Amino acid sequence: SEVILIVLVVIINVGIGLIQEGRAEKSVESIKNMLSSRATVIRSGERTAVDSAQVVPGDVILIHSGDRIPADLRLIEVHTLQIQEAMLTGESNPVTKKLDVFPEDTVLADRKNIAFTATMVTKGVGR
């Protein structure tokens, strides 16, 4: 009778694992879809719209209210820029971005001069 109980628990655990794996795959697919957006970049002095997957290091990306951040960005210019980072930090209020230089040991989420992939601009403009 104990063997049957153990086998039953193992079967239930396997079932739960399969369900969670299916949900995780759906989540990954959703994130991929969120990331496949357009970005306005400045390349060789020219303003161009490109697919987010085509953003490369060295591109200057223009962001404004309503945009989804296409890649992790180091901000070089901000004007009342606020970004919703709840999906990363759990904080419900948008984060006001600044150009300050932060110490090297500053936790990544506390660096206000970086915009993170797939977060949303709620106010202002930047690059």
Image (cartoon, rainbow, N blue to C red):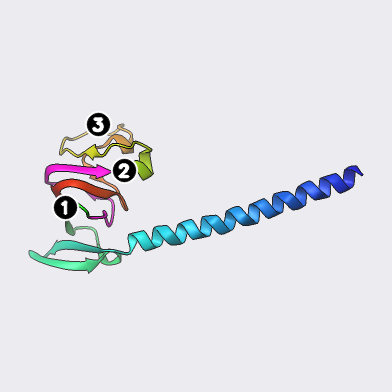
Give yes or no for residue 123 being in the magenta stretch. no
Q: Position of residue 111 (x, y in %)?
A: 26, 37
Visible residue check, residue 75: no
Q: Position of residue 3 (x, y in %)?
A: 88, 46
**Which residue is at the front of the view, 44 or 99?**
99
Give yes or no for residue 84 being in the magenta stretch. yes
Does 108 sit left or right of 67 as displayed?
A: right
Residue, disc 3: 103
Query: Residue 121: which numbered mark, if any?
Result: none
Compared to 74, does 89 lie above or below?
Answer: above
Q: Earlier in the sequence, mark 3 or mark 2?
A: 2
Residue, disc 1: 64
Amino acid residing under circle 2 = Glu
**Which residue is at the front of the view, 83 or 107?**
83
Measure how far apart labels 1 and 3 are at the Cα level: 27 Å
Q: Position of residue 127 (x, y in %)?
A: 15, 51
Give the structural element (helix, strand or loop) at label 2: loop
Amino acid residing under circle 1 = His
Mark 1 vs 3: CB contact within 8 A: no
Measure how far apart labels 3 and 2 are at the Cα level: 21 Å
Q: Earlier in the sequence, mark 2 or mark 1?
A: 1
What residue is rendered at 14% in x and 49% in y? 126
Quadrant of the image occupied by residue 87: top left
**Which residue is at the front of the view, 75 or 19?**
19
Amino acid residing under circle 3 = Pro
Residue, disc 2: 85
Give the extent of the magenta segment: 67-85
Compared to 47, does 2 lie above or below?
Answer: above
Mark 3 vs 2: CB contact within 8 A: no
Visible residue check, residue 47: yes
Measure how far apart labels 2 and 1 are at the Cα level: 15 Å
Does 26 sit left or right of 72 as displayed?
A: right
